[in-house]
Image (spheres, helix red, strand yellow):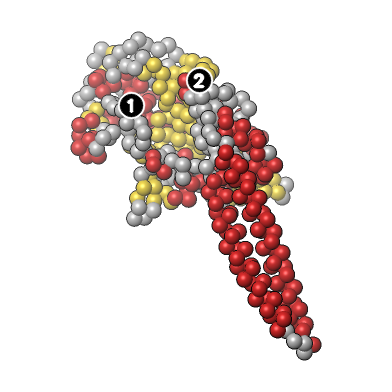
Amino acid sequence: MLDIELIRTNPQLVKENLAKRQLDPAIIDEIYEIDKRWREVKQALDQARREKNLLSQSIVEYRKQGKDISPLLQKGKELSQQIERLEKEEKELLKKRNALLAQVPNLLHESVPYGKDDSENVEVRRWGTPRGEGPAHYEIAKKYIDAERGAKLGGHRFTVLWDRIAKLERALGFFMVEHALSRGYKEVSVPHLVRSEIMYGTGQLPKFQKDLYHCERDDLYLIPTAEVPLTNLHKNEILEENELPKRYVAWTPCYRREAGEYGRDIKGLMRQHQFYKTELVKITLPEESWREHELMVKDAESVLQALELPYRVVLLCSGDVGFCSAKTYDLEVWVPSQNKYREISSVSNCTDFQARRIPIKFRREGKLEYVHTLNGSGVAVGRALLALIENHYEDGGIKIPKALQPYMHTDFLEL
């Protein structure tokens, strides 16, 4: 969430940011006017409370002196009614202002290029040599990738993996966690069901309600990514400056409705309602977050390099950057069957946007400040699995990269 003081002092900056994101800036004028009225009401409420306190003191003195207090009691009744009315209006205005403020995305970093949509993202670099167009993973490993039984059990976009492909998926997850540990992250096992306030803290609610699986009876949400519980670990806490940065990794299933995506990637593992992902999260000092952002990109890249998968790094343009992010890099892995790069990791710096919503603060020289939060896939296991099958398929099997061999106990997986 943005600091309301920014809208009070520089609403034009926030409007320009919305315009860069291809969003209507009119909401800022609405927030500004509601906030202005809220401050007026709050000032009047504070004044009425002060008057009532002074009046109460006068009543005590009048009683001591034996004076008639009936005029004061009448005035007190009028003030109480005024306070009740102002309190109600103040709460309603604050609720309305904050609900609108929750819909405003983060400010973009100055280095984010202008663009309308993902077609205008900027390629930063490439690694590896893409192989030519080839068969799809669900054709290569058709005995082990079972969409029919997945649909029988869970419906559309669920898949059963059998035997050696199930083992390869598990090996990828284990490898990714161990790899993150070697780069300074701390492993965390987190709940897969969280409260609505946790979803709100990282920005999934209210904006992305339709994409989430909600257990209404318990008012709990299945996590769409481990970013949600990891970033909220220190909710309502005050950290010390010397505790930062914190670097966490978790390997979890993720659950997404993929609303609005029907018709895309119907076959195979590219777009599932349930999939595994290794997630990286950092909680940092404000002045360190941009350096840590670049390092997190390198952490995600090193996974793909270890798996010997060709990829490219793309800087998202203003029209494609996510709601909470100030700047995002996507890592796109080469998918031979589609003859193009596809996203396998997004690495974002959310600055203090999530920290204000959660909230999380730290203490520096006796003063409290908001931390910065960062997140990135390290990486999506299902997409790494399909990329591995397609890029390393040869002679009736899959060549296992050296980094995975300790987990698979072989250098070649026959299919």
Q: Amino acid at mark 2?
A: Glu
Q: Is residue 384 left or right of residue 104?
A: left
Q: Is residue 110 left or right of residue 192?
A: right
Seen from the viewer's position, the closer of residues 302 and 198 is 198
Pointer 1 residue: 264
Q: Quadrant of residue 386?
A: top left
Q: Residue at x 64, y 53 (%)?
A: 37
Q: Residue at x 35, y 21 (%)?
A: 388
Seen from the viewer's position, the closer of residues 214 and 250 is 214
Q: Position of residue 74 (x, y in %)?
A: 68, 79
Q: In the displayed structure, would residue 69 be above or below residue 346?
A: below
The single residue placed furthest to the top in the displayed view is: 132
Q: Position of residue 96 (x, y in %)?
A: 55, 51
Q: Quadrant of residue 345?
A: top left
Quadrant showing the C terminus:
top left
Q: Quadrant of residue 138?
A: top left
Q: Residue at x 60, y 32 (%)?
A: 17
Quadrant showing the N terminus:
top right
Q: Residues within 10 Å of mark 1 (few under 14, many from 20)?
A: few
Q: Residue at x 69, y 61 (%)?
A: 44
Q: Which mark is residue 120?
A: 2
Q: Amino acid at mark 1?
A: Arg
Q: Secondary structure at mark 2?
A: helix
Q: Are marks 2 and 1 in contact (CB under 8 Å)?
A: no
Q: CA distance from mark 2 to mark 1?
A: 20 Å
Q: Position of residue 82 (x, y in %)?
A: 64, 68
Q: In the displayed structure, would residue 188 be above or below residue 270?
A: below
The single residue placed furthest to the bottom in the displayed view is: 66
Q: Secondary structure at mark 1?
A: loop
Q: Which mark is residue 335?
A: none
